[in-house]
Image (cartoon, rainbow, N blue to C red):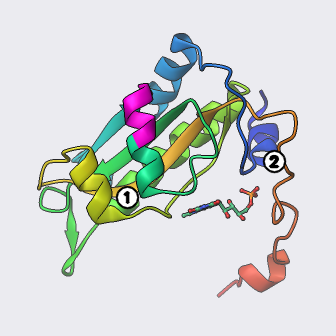
Amino acid sequence: MEFDKVIRERKATRLFSDKKLEKDKLDKILEAGRIAPTAKNIQPFKIYIIESKEGLKKLDKVTPCRYKAPIVLLICGEPEKSYNKNGHPTYEMDSSIVTTHMMLEATNLGVDNIWIEMFDEEKIIKEFDIPSNLKPVCLLPLGYKSKICPPSPFHKIRKNINDLVEYK
Ligand SMILES: Cc1cc2nc3c(=O)[nH]c(=O)nc-3n(C[C@H](O)[C@H](O)[C@H](O)COP(=O)(O)O)c2cc1C
């Protein structure tokens, strides 16, 4: 897909069908995350792939936002290892860039997706035995939208460029 089309076509999917995500597409999406830039190239992140029946059931206990996706990536950052900018570790920035790379590659491959921050952090750590050096940053449900998927309500609502950009 043309890059311009990718960034315009990407939208939040809030109801997935039960169609499985093909392994070759998953691998390409993960590869897009692997090659993402991170501060000082430290790569302080880990991606958990949740697709088993048991894993998805656990996930539904910690977020209302799986939207029936058959596979969900949990992106975690490593605060202690990440670059530290004046007392602010960059692991969230790094993990967000990784997730953005994966989200756009998913769209490029025709795979629907949505970025999720609404989950119970304590519970997700407990349910998935996340090691103490890692902090969950976001979830990325992946799959194919259901035929009755509602349109993303805010997709077309964007501020005017002049409200967002200022030349100095
Ligand atoms: C950092 C971030 C966190 C988000 N968290 C959630 C979430 O927890 N639940 C949800 O339904 N959508 C979530 N979204 C999706 C946004 O609501 C959505 O991207 C926004 O409304 C714009 O719509 P669009 O993606 O279709 O253009 C999140 C998006 C971002 C970038």
Label 2 near ligand 1 (CB < 8 Å)? no
Pointer 1 or 2: first along the chain: 2
Name the residue: 56% across, 41% down: 141
Circles 1 and 2, Cβ within 8 Å, touching? The answer is no
Q: Amino acid at mark 2?
A: Arg
Main secondary-structure element of the magenta-colored stretch: helix
Residue at the disc numbered 1: 137
- In front: mark 1 or mark 2? 1
Residue at the disc numbered 2: 8
Name the residue: 76% across, 35% down: 145
- The stretch in magenta equals 51-57
Name the residue: 72% across, 30% down: 17
Q: Position of residue 1 (x, y in %)?
A: 77, 27
Name the residue: 31% across, 50% down: 76
Q: Please, what secondary structure does the residue beneath circle 2 have?
A: helix
Q: Is residue 165 above or below residue 141?
A: below
Point out the quarter of the image occupied by ligand 1. bottom right
- The reply to whether residue 34 is visible in this rendering is no
